[in-house]
Image (cartoon, rainbow, N blue to C red):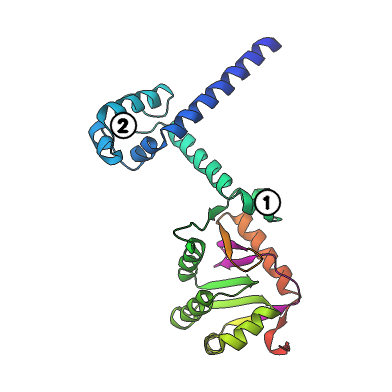
Amino acid sequence: MDSAEIFYIVIVKVLWMTDVVEVLCSRREYVEAIEDGCRGKRELAQELDVSESMVYKAIRELRGHGIVDDHDYSLTVTGRLLLENYRKMQRISDASELWERLDVPTEVLEDARPVLPKRHAPQRPIDKLETEIDRASKIRGLAPTILHRYVSATDEMIRENDLDAEFVVEQDVLRELAENYGELFHSSLEHGMEVLVTEEELPFGHAVLDGDRSCIVVYDDRGRVEGALFFRSPEAVAWTEEIYERYRCDARHFEGVEI
């Protein structure tokens, strides 16, 4: 095979991929409905509130690109893989501003599942974090800022769920805890929470949960949550554990810190 033939094959494959991705994007609601279990033209029409003729046209196009099986209403292996990779690209696109602000290895970010605030649901990242903490028996974290939800939810889980908790905080966070959250703060301490104070500026919020999952929370300059990244791969969790230990080794127990 000469270079001209190889070039032609490459161009054909690139054009095919471009075309199939465009079809997947334009027909994504059909693909996801089929993934969720819709198994017929009428069912898809009802689910998507479209006419059966529109379903027929969409399915014919998806079958023509190998995304939907020719014999029934199910995704092909190609369709499932394309959808999975489309979602991965969408996650990367949605969280692009977070990626650019973090000095995080690419291999760690490959595993990240971003949760971003929405106009109608600005607390989505914190809701997700609380859900993860509620499932945990052990947490190790970095706290560059403080929210009432963090303090009250953590105290409740330490008292009621016997959560093993240790945090490295900035000195201003310790001062805020002591001055404005004294009762909750001391309740958590009495039930076993450990707090260490660092003189460094923490680059982001961070938690390692049970040693098998972790997250990073990104804040703006005013302490508002810009988004959170959740990890499960061993490589990502190991990296977040290393970050925690890096700050922990130079931190002091809060009782030895003047505030």
Examine the rendered structure and indicate whether residue 160 appears above or below residue 69. below
Direction from residue 34 to residue 147 in the image, left or right: right
Tell me which residue sits at (66%, 66%) in the image.
221
Q: Which residue is mark 1?
A: 100
The answer to whether 249 is drawn above or below residue 97 in the figure is below
Mark 1 surroundings: few (<14), some (14-19) or many (≥20) residues within 10 A? few
Q: Is residue 169 left or right of residue 161?
A: right
Any part of residue 1 in sight: no
Indicate the quadrant containing the C terminus: top left, top right, bottom left or bottom right.
bottom right
Reply yes or no: does residue 23 show up in magenta: no
Horizontal side, residue 218 vs residue 250: left or right = left
Span shown in magenta: 196-219
Estimate the x, y position of residue 124 in percent, counting from the top left.
48, 61
The Cα atoms of the two marked residues, 1 and 2, are separated by 40 Å
Tell me which corner region of the image, top left, top right, bottom left or bottom right, holds residue 6.
Answer: top right
Asked where in the image residue 76 lies, by quadrant, the reply is top left
Q: Nearer the viewer, residue 88 or 108?
A: 88
Q: Which residue is mark 2?
A: 73
